[in-house]
Image (cartoon, helix red, strand yellow):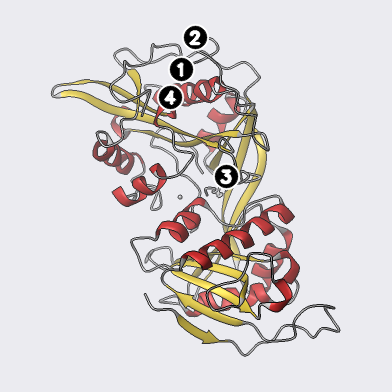
Amino acid sequence: MTQRSEPVSHTVPSPAANPGRPPAGPRIEVSGSLPAQDIAAVAMLTEAATEADGVRPLSEHVSLHLRYGGEGPDRHILLLLPAEPTEGLGLTTTTGEVVVGYAHLDPTDAVAGSAAELVVHPAYRGRGLGRLLVEAANELTPDGRLRLWAHGDHPAARRLAESMGFRVVRRLEQLRRSLYSPLPGLHLPAGVRLRAFRPGEDDAAWLRLNARAFAGHPEQGSWTEHDLDARMQESWFDPQGFLIAEEDGPDGPVMVAFHWTKIHGGEPGHGHPHPESSTAPPTPTTAPLQSGTAPLTPGTAPLTPGTAPLTPGTAPGDPDGEGPVEDLRAHGHDPIGEVYVVGVDPDQQGRGLGRSVTVAGLRWLRSRGLPQAMLYVEADNAPALAVYHGLGFTHWDTDVMFYRAG
């Protein structure tokens, strides 16, 4: 899609108010996709904000759409200034300007309204640039309704949202627990067995189960093959940590539940978790049991294909079962495991499958030498919170969604 430039009449404060900062007015550029250099510049901007705030400003959902594109009419909004003041920071775009702010708009939800996430470089905050990004996003919505995510519930983000007439409509809690603490034993219902996800073989069946488990969740439940493929391309993807619970049906094995785990920081150069999302979530990412849970999104080889199912009572490499414990702490910072997505077929509720596969995933993460696990859960999901608190999870952080009607 050809980029469309939209001049902005507002200007940043003068150098007297902000010594060493450019007096030129910012320019906003909107596009449906970004070239590689601009994506890299936004990534550098995101990392600068993450280091300054201790939380990633963009969810996994947005980060994946930024890199791989989406299936809908997403909009990428760049806030640009002349390049000279920030040369050498890796923020230069294909136009020769630097990106000091970025917003992502997803206008596809006709029921809840468009959703946006945004970030301003720490060196350029306090000048009204965040407000410009919100105004630009709002102008691009089909009906003037807009939802905004504030990852980590940053005070400045809350002040901005409230000053523009937004109100809180959703809270997503991030919970954590030590994996050094004792974990419950794994007890599966009779006839149910665990195995690892088989990429290329399980895709369609898993997407059907995910849609059923999250039928009431517009973000997670609408995942397509594109969404699954994008995540399987990520460096963190490990099918051995994607646990499938199945049992025999009239026509062969049937998936009844799953626990997809994720490791943040398990690869050199991997971004920090959403102090960690997940993002992010983070992404933007998940929580709960029974009919399922979803990763954070604005508003979301198995043991080796063909290997034997896991023995009930152990996860692969579980310290309480058999197999080595891998040390992943050799890279720059401690990694952390995530209860990424847990889903249960609605027809299978009441069998304790949600808790069972959650425990299996936690034991898997511990087998990888991880010291801690995290997850996301809706703040008003009392049953899921009760389960996770019962498994030793405690509150760590909160993501907040704001909403303003058109």
| Label whose residue precedes the other's in the sequence (2 or 4) | 2
Where is residue 307 shown, x and y percent of the image?
Answer: 31, 18
The residue that label 1 is drawn on is 315
Where is residue 94 shown, x and y percent of the image?
Answer: 52, 74
The residue that label 4 is drawn on is 357
Of the residues shown, which amino acid type is indicated by label 3? Ala
The residue that label 3 is drawn on is 379
Q: Which mark is residue 372?
A: none
| Label whose residue precedes the other's in the sequence (2 or 1) | 1
Q: CA distance from mark 4 to mark 1?
A: 10 Å
Question: Left or right: where does residue 333 sit relative to residue 284?
Answer: right
Which of the 4 image quadrants contains residue 304?
Answer: top left
Q: CA distance from mark 2 to mark 1?
A: 7 Å
For the N terminus, the quadrant is bottom left
Query: Which residue is located at x 57 percent, y 48 percent?
Result: 277
Q: CA distance from mark 3 to mark 4?
A: 22 Å
- Circles 2 and 1: CB distance less than 8 Å? yes
Q: CA distance from mark 3 to mark 2?
A: 34 Å
The residue that label 2 is drawn on is 321
| Label whose residue precedes the other's in the sequence (3 or 2) | 2
Q: Is residue 394 above or below residue 61?
A: above
Q: CA distance from mark 2 to mark 4?
A: 16 Å
